[in-house]
Amino acid sequence: MGEPLDVLALGDFAWDVLIHTGAPLAPGGDTFGQVELQPGGSAANVAVWARRCGARAGFVGKIGRDRFGELARENLAEEGVEFYLSETSSRPTGVVAVWVDHGGQRSMVSGQGADFLLTPGDLPAELENARHLHLTGWSLFTDPPRRAALAAARRARDAGRTLSLDPASFQLIEETGPAAFVRMTAGLEPAVIFPNYDEGRVLTGAREPEVMARRLSELYPGAVVALKLDAKGALVGSGERFAYLPPTPDQASDATGAGDAFAGAFLARWTRGYAPDEAARFAVVVSGWVVARRGARPPLDARMKEHCGV
């Protein structure tokens, strides 16, 4: 099968319609701003950032038989990500509307596109050839694609591979039920989990990050907890031992995809033997750079190329 991938992300590829306004929306009225189309999707973003940060990365997903699907293939190829894409005529390639307000916070409307039709039969034989599998909650909240994601996790675990999980949405965790979500995901025995503050709050009921991190470690025994605290940095560790990583001085402009960039950068280092706190320190710089720019995958500048070693 060739050299194993360091990271294989499974789940969503979607095109982000980014809407930036310098002021709150005027209900029933008109507002000037900027509207852009950019590649996205949480799992695809993780794969791209892992590749940008030096890992051999792949992506498993489903696209529509449409122009946006063709563009998805072109985008992943340009990024150097090895992709395993199945196609469907039943739904178009995923599109997400992302409104970014004047303070940099984003609100999303996610259409259930072709990525939500991924089935176990779409999983590639190459899945076991990856050292690490990354899943997001977006692949677990509905079925399909839940059965495909769980089948991939079982295959990876049976092959002795490691697994990571991004819970993805505190609202959908609340709808699923925090206890039910933990039962479903803790049984996958993830080696790393990437909750943000709100996801951690819903999963644990705690509000203090240190308490939250310890409770998450109890819910996911043996897992490295990489708790993303947005403008306050990150907490990383397991059990009772956590390292605090302060934020970068980057000025927040657009939070879209910053958590995915953190996960991809972290996995690029962690899967190559770096300690969790070292991988997280590297990832904080990457995600801080992303949040100061528009979109989930802004083109690398000289600073970020040097940081990533490319």
Image (spheres, rainbow, N blue to C red):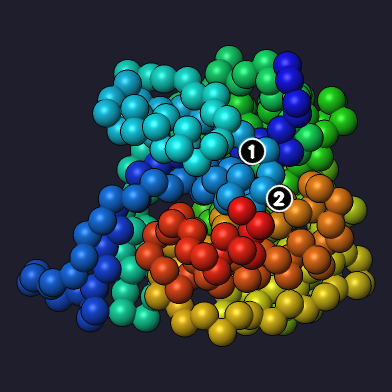
Report the amino acid beneath label 2: Ala
Q: Is there any visible trace of residue 84 in the rendered image?
A: yes
Residue tagged 2: 268
User: Looking at this view, is 108 or 230 the one in front?
Assistant: 230
Residue tagged 1: 57
Horizontal arrangement in the rendering, residue 62 relative to residue 180 (left or right):
left
User: Compared with residue 249, is residue 254 higher up or lower down, i.e. above or below?
Assistant: above
- State how far apart marks 2 and 1 are (Cα): 9 Å
Horizontal arrangement in the rendering, residue 242 relative to residue 234 (left or right):
right
Q: Quadrant of the N terminus?
A: top right
Which percent across, then down, holds residue 202?
A: 63, 65
CB atoms at circles 2 and 1 under 8 Å apart? yes
Q: Residue at x 47, y 33 (%)?
A: 77
Element on which disc 2 rests: helix
Report the amino acid beneath label 1: Ala
Q: Residue at x 76, y 61 (%)?
A: 279
Using the rendered view, name the quadrant where residue 51 is placed: top right
Of all residues, the one furthest to the left in this rendering is 29
- Mark 1, Cα crowd under 10 Å, few <14 / some 14-19 / many 20+, is many
User: Compared with residue 82, is residue 251 higher up or lower down, i.e. above or below?
Assistant: below
Which percent across, then down, holds residue 27?
A: 14, 72
Q: Residue at x 41, y 20 (%)?
A: 87
Which percent across, then down, holds residue 284?
A: 65, 70
Which percent across, then down, holds residue 233?
A: 65, 77
